[in-house]
Image (cartoon, rainbow, N blue to C red):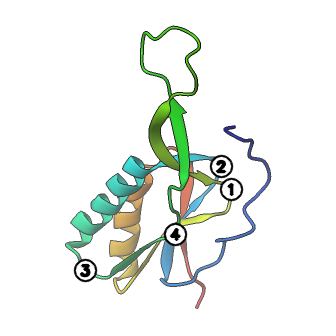
């Protein structure tokens, strides 16, 4: 049903688009609302300068029964969509801005994430 996650990510662990990014340090589910909040924090800080790439997509539906409903009656309705994330996965990438601006913007986005993260830069 909800599945189990173990091990490290083996896909999405290297830079594909930008020069700076956020990497997940632990496993967890990141909801579509949290991804959007992080995206808005980045674009607000950079005043829409540079480019942002979101490397995760919430494609796992999570169901939930309404509050104060008796047992039984089948499976609940879809409550939200999440992106399962493993350790080492790049969540966001940024390019076209200076290192200081990128790290400040990504730090704001990292605060919106439910998992521990670290900021990384592509090795030139």
Give the spatial CA distance, label 4 vs label 1.
14 Å
Asked if the residue under mark 1 is in contact with the one under mark 3, i.e. CB atoms within 8 Å, the reply is no
The x, y position of residue 100, in whole percent, is: 36, 74
Reading the image, the residue beneath label 2 is 26
Residue that appears at 59% across and 14% down: 72
The image shows residue 9, relative to residue 61, as above or below, that is: below
| Mark 4 Cα shell of 10 Å, populated few (<14), some (14-19), many (≥20) | some
Reading the image, the residue beneath label 3 is 49
Asked if the residue under mark 2 is in contact with the one under mark 4, i.e. CB atoms within 8 Å, the reply is no
Residue that appears at 57% across and 10% down: 71
Reading the image, the residue beneath label 4 is 55
In the structure shown, which secondary structural element does the residue marked by tag 3 occupy?
loop
The x, y position of residue 30, in whole percent, is: 51, 49
Residue that appears at 64% across and 77% down: 14
In the structure shown, which secondary structural element does the residue marked by tag 1 occupy?
loop
Q: Is residue 79 left or right of residue 10?
A: left
Give the spatial CA distance, label 3 vs label 4.
19 Å
The x, y position of residue 124, in whole percent, is: 58, 91
Front label number (3 vs 4): 4
The earlier-in-sequence mark between 3 and 1 is 3
The earlier-in-sequence mark between 4 and 2 is 2
In the structure shown, which secondary structural element does the residue marked by tag 4 occupy?
loop
Reading the image, the residue beneath label 1 is 87
């Amino acid at each position: 049903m909800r599945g189990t996650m173990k091990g490290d990510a083996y896909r999405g662990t290297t830079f594909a688009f930008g020069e700076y990014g956020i990497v997940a340090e632990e496993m967890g589910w990141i909801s579509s609302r949290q991804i959007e909040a992080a995206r808005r924090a980045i674009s607000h800080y950079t005043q829409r300068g540079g480019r942002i790439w979101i490397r995760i997509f919430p494609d796992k539906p999570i169901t939930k029964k309404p509050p104060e409903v008796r047992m039984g009656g089948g499976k609940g309705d879809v409550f939200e969509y999440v992106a399962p994330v493993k350790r080492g996965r790049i969540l966001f990438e940024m390019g076209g801005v200076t290192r200081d601006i990128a790290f400040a913007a990504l730090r704001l986005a990292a605060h919106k994430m439910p998992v521990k993260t670290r900021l990384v830069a592509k090795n030139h």
